[in-house]
């Protein structure tokens, strides 16, 4: 009898406490400065090792994947499949995997769900296939999948620069946030390529983020363009303001979030908003749930 080799792993979402665009590379990618913060809103991925070398993926919660109609095949650019195949081709590994994804993090939200799924796939298969790659190797592969993937492989909240690959760990106070996701979203490439995007915010220093100056580092340069393409974002920000909450957008949206006062036990109802909005209180994480697997050497 052969024992089945199984592994279940979480993939947490992130919030961008601020996001500045400070330049643009020759290849069109934007140079940014941001603080990326992990939160306790997670997808879960289930892996079974296959000796055939085949990679397959199943959605346990297809309602949360707007790209997927019932019975429809996954798109070729699916990040979980791409992560698994990138790991196979980087290492010559002949194992395969059956992967089931329990999606909880909304898509087109700016919460990094797809990138986090890809990062957790790299971390899990590195173990399940016994590859022994270190965190730096995984981050190099991760960057080929998406600019946010290296952050999730870094394992810590971070001051992020470059296009997303330069990470400095940062300690953040425990805090709770209300996160609100409109039913609509805008495409990340459409936001980044928009002619009216502000791309020349002066560089800040990590020290500027220290408590006394934090108020000055809260803006998201993608927000005005995202609102043009997805007016629901403005509706979410107004709803937050009406409830006395100081909200901003995460990543390229469309989720908006606001810190909750310590001990705040208010219940928020989004019944007055049109369409299907998701509201959730989340706490920040000090480190990735797979932190021990993220070692750089
Ligand atoms: O890297 P990722 O696939 O997540 O990025 C999606 C799109 O967002 C890219 O194709 C690019 O147009 C834009 N982008 C950018 N600069 C970044 C990150 C993303 O221009 N730092």
Image: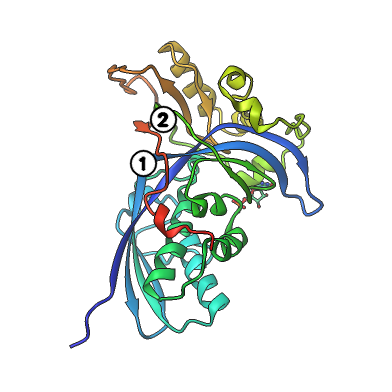
Residue at horizontal 43 percent and vertical 35 percent from the top: 183
Q: Point out residue 167 in the picture as x, y percentages from the top left corner.
A: 60, 46
Q: Residue furthest left?
A: 1
Q: Point out residue 190 in the picture as x, y percentages from the top left corner.
A: 66, 43
Name the one closer to the observer, 153 or 180: 153
Q: Is residue 244 above or below residue 27?
A: above
Q: Is residue 193 above or below residue 79?
A: above
- Is residue 102 visible in the rendered image? The answer is no
For this view, does 70 lie left or right of residue 163?
A: left
Name the one closer to the observer, 292 or 276: 292
Q: Nearer the viewer, mark 2 or mark 1?
A: 1
- Can you tell which mark lies on residue 179? 2
Q: Residue furthest right?
A: 26
Residue at horizontal 50 percent and vertical 43 percent from the top: 108
- Is residue 169 visible in the rendered image? The answer is yes
For this view, does 66 lie left or right of residue 59?
A: right
Q: Point out residue 86 in the picture as x, y percentages from the top left corner.
A: 54, 71
Residue at horizontal 60 percent and vertical 28 percent from the top: 227
Q: Secondary structure at mark 1?
A: strand
Circles 2, 1 touching at the beta carbon (< 8 Å)? yes
Is the C-beta of the residue carrying label 1 under 8 Å from the nearest atom of ligand 1? Answer: no
Label 2 or label 1, whichever comes before in sequence order: 1
| Residue 35, quarter of the rendered image | top right
For this view, does 2 lie left or right of residue 113?
A: left
Name the one closer to the observer, 270 or 176: 176
Q: Point out residue 259 in the picture as x, y percentages from the top left corner.
A: 44, 22
| Residue 51, quarter of the rendered image | bottom left
Q: Is residue 104 above or below residue 58?
A: above
- Can you tell which mark lies on residue 41? 1
Q: Secondary structure at mark 2?
A: strand
């Amino acid at each position: 009898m052969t024992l089945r080799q199984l592994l279940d792993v979480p993939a947490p979402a992130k919030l961008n406490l601020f996001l500045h665009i400070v330049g643009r590379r020759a290849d069109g990618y934007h140079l940014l400065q941001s603080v990326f913060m992990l939160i306790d809103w997670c997808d879960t991925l289930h892996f079974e090792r296959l000796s055939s070398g085949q990679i397959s993926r199943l959605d346990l919660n297809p309602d949360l994947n707007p790209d997927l109609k019932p019975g429809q095949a996954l798109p070729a650019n699916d990040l979980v499949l791409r992560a698994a195949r990138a790991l196979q081709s980087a290492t010559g590994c002949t194992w395969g995997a059956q992967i089931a994804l329990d999606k909880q993090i909304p898509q087109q939200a700016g919460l990094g769900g797809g990138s986090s799924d890809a990062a957790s796939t790299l971390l899990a298969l590195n173990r399940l296939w016994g590859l022994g790659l270190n965190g730096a190797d995984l981050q190099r592969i991760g960057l080929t999948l998406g600019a946010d993937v290296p952050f999730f492989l870094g394992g810590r909240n971070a001051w992020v620069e470059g296009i997303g690959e330069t990470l400095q760990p940062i300690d953040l106070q425990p805090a709770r946030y209300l996160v609100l996701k409109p039913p609509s979203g805008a495409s990340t490439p459409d936001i980044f390529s928009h002619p009216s995007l502000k791309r020349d915010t002066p560089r800040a220093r990590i020290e500027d983020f220290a408590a006394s100056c934090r108020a000055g580092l809260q803006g998201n340069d993608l927000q005005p363009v995202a609102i043009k393409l997805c007016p629901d974002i403005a509706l979410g920000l107004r709803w937050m303001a009406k409830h006395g909450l100081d909200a901003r957008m995460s990543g390229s949206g469309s989720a908006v979030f606001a810190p909750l006062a310590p001990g705040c036990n208010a219940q928020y109802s989004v019944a007055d908003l049109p369409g299907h909005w998701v509201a959730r209180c989340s706490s920040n994480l000090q480190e990735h749930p797979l932190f021990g697997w993220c070692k750089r050497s």
